Amino acid sequence: MGSFFDGKIPVIISPVYFSCPGLCNFHLNGLTEGLHGVDWNAGQKFRVLAVSFDSKETPEVARGKKARYMKVYNRPGTEDGWHFLTLSEGSVKTLMESVGFRFKWNEENKEWAHASAAIIVTPDGVISRYLPGIVFEPRDVKLALNEATEGKIGNFIEGLVLYCFQYNPHASKYTIAAINVMKLGGALMVLMLGLWLLPVWVRTKREQKTAGS
C-alpha cells in the first residue's frame, strides 16, 4: 500500500467488494460520476484505490471490475491512476481497522453488510476526510482532494474556493464558511480602498514637495 503514497498527491480509498450485488456498485458509479465532473485526472493530481475487503476475491475479478469502470471513466492514460486491489485476509483486517471501516458477513443473504464512503487520504498516508454515501458532488471531491494537500494541488482560484468552504459533517458536504467569506470580503475592501486612496496620497506628496521647494 505504501507504494501508492508518494508524498505529493492525495489518494481516494474506496472500501468495496467487487462481487457486491448492490451498494458497492452504487458507490463506484457515484464516485465515477463525481470524478467525471472534476477537471483533474486520476494519476496526475490524485490516485484512486478501490480495495476489496473480501479476501476471497481474486486479482482476475479485480481486473474485470477495473476494465468496466475505466470504460465508464473514459479518461485515456489514467489506468495507472486508478487501481482495483485484492488483499489477503490479514491485510484486509489491518487496512480496514486503520481506516475505521466495518463490515460483517450476512449469512442469510449471503453478502457483506457494510457502509459506503470514499476516504480521502493525504499524500503521506493520513486520513483527511470521509465522504459518506453513494453520491459524490464534483465540487466536494475536488475540495476534499485540495484540502488533503492544504491547497497545494490547486491553483490560486481553487485555493480561494477552498478558503471559502468548510466541510459540514451534518450535511455531508462542503458549505460556505461565512466567517471566511467575510474576512476575504473585508480584505478586498481594504485593498480597493488603498488603491483608491493611492493617487490622492501621491498627489499630496507631490504638492508638499513643490510647496517645500
Image (spheres, helix red, strand yellow):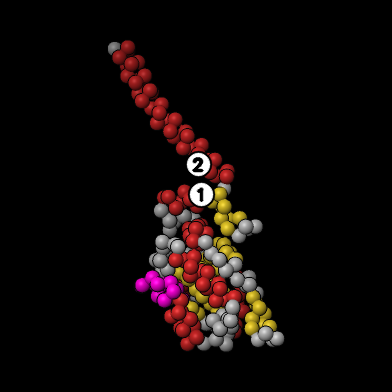
Looking at the picture, which amino acid does disc 1 mark?
A: Tyr
For mark 2, does the 10 Å Cα neighbourhood hold few (<14), some (14 to 19), or many (20 or more) residues?
some
Q: Which residues are magenta?
A: 71-83
| Residue 9 seen from this side | no
Determine which quarter of the picture holds residue 154. bottom left
Towards the viewer: 209 or 151: 151
Q: Relative to 207, is 183 above or below?
A: below
**Mark 1 touches mark 2? (CB < 8 Å):** yes
Q: Position of residue 46 (x, y in %)?
A: 44, 66
Queried whether the magenta region covers residue 130, the answer comes back as: no
Residue placed under numbered mark 2 in the picture: 184
| Residue 116 seen from this side | yes
Residue at 41% over, 50% down = 156
**Callout 2: SS:** helix
Q: Which mark is residue 163?
A: 1
Q: Position of residue 139 (x, y in %)?
A: 49, 58
**Callout 1: SS:** helix
Residue at 47% over, 87% down = 60
Query: With 4 as the anchor, is 176 left or right in this view?
Result: right
